[in-house]
Image (tube, rainbow, N blue to C red):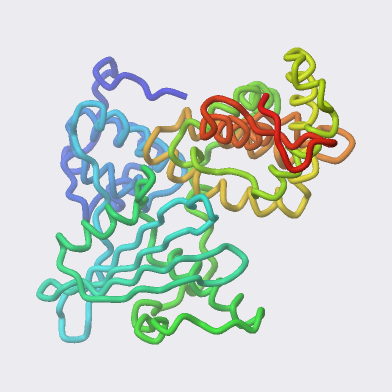
Amino acid sequence: MTMANPSKLAPSKLDDAWIHAAADDALAAITSAGDKSQELVEAWVRAGNAQAVAVVAERGSGAARKAARRGAQVLGSRGIRVEAAPRVTKLARDAETVTEAWLVPPDPNGIVLIVLSTRSTTSRAHSGFFYLRSGFGIEEVSVGELSGSKLKEALRRAGSLGLEPVSISPGYARQRILEERKRLTELKLPEPLSMMSAEALLEPAPEAPEPHPFDVEGLELADEDAAELAKKSALLHQLPEFRSWLPDRNIVAELLSNLGAELGPEGSQDQEKVAQVMTEAIRGATDRYFTPERRTGLLKLMKDSALGVLNSHGEVRALEVVATMKAIEAAGLITNPPHEVPFLRAFFEKAVLTLAMQNGGKLSVPMSGRAPAQDAV
């Protein structure tokens, strides 16, 4: 899992031109290196060639790309900033056009932000902010001309709640936007008015489907390893990517109502019984809430969040997300019910704790026979 310490690697007979390759020549150097491609990446790390590492980490493939991702983390730990080079295309008039794209992981409402920005070397960035609700279309679109500093500021504001924008390919960004645009048509819903101003940003459409950026990272786990990691999946809720995720209010209210009915007017005085009944109520609510359909939607959002976790917290935490997703995929109604996945159960544990904190440390529970008054437990 960990990259070998570059300082302890024996020097390898690599072409000196490969080692000092510029960003534009990095992919060609990797191809020329053949079966020594991983050695070349490690040599770049030793030499501090961050730009070459960044290009292969973003646009390379196979073992070389994985080595470059790890190398980027090593360079980052040394304080060497690793940024992917922007995509550059040529216009007919021979002016350079730079196109970049970012994804901001889902917010508490399941909204994913895709940002597309295109600029020439002599113009401001034509930028579009597309707010997508996966499977339900495009919620909002904002398009405008921004300077480089204004674009960075807008991205910083967009990454609220501690969510960091992740660089993705323009092709994949367009693919996601066009998929949700098609979904609006299928649902017979109107497009946001600003979509008319965004047409130029959505071309060219990808010629072939692009995989999700997280799928090409090669982060895989054996079933036994995944099951072990998933046992501590509740801790993922401490990360900004999941911290604000909560279940619907109505099912939390139902949980409290069931709790009150089970305890009765006298039961709230028995703290041991309260804890036992609360545990069962949370398990039941988790199983009712996380239906197969909701779990499928959750997994799509988690993949976007996993990309953010990898970008901000590294490969180890991203593997914890992978393990949790495998556990959720394996969940069923009879065997492996949802409440056995700590990450899912923590949705309700977090909701109950939040309500108690808002009420001075006490949880207001509706008690049967005492309507409309409530008892605190």
Report the residue at 26% width, 76% height from top: 144
Report the residue at 43% width, 39% height from top: 240
Q: In which quarter of the image is residue 161?
A: top left
Q: Is residue 360 visible?
A: yes
Residue 71: x and y, percent?
A: 32, 33
Report the residue at 21% width, 45% height from top: 51
Residue 54: x and y, percent?
A: 28, 45
Residue 374: x and y, percent?
A: 70, 35
Q: In this view, does 210 lie to the left or right of 52?
A: right
Report the residue at 18% width, 46% height from top: 21
Near-viewer residue (162 or 44) = 162
Near-viewer residue (175 or 258) = 258
Q: In this view, does 368 lie to the left or right of 67?
A: right
Q: In this view, does 68 lie to the left or right of 280?
A: left
Near-viewer residue (100 or 304) = 304
Q: In this view, does 277 lie above or below 187?
A: above
Q: In this view, does 321 lie to the left or right of 159?
A: right
Q: In this view, does 250 lie above or below 42?
A: below
Residue 211: x and y, percent?
A: 53, 57
Pick the quarter of the image with the C terminus. Answer: top right
Q: Can residue 319 be seen in this view?
A: no
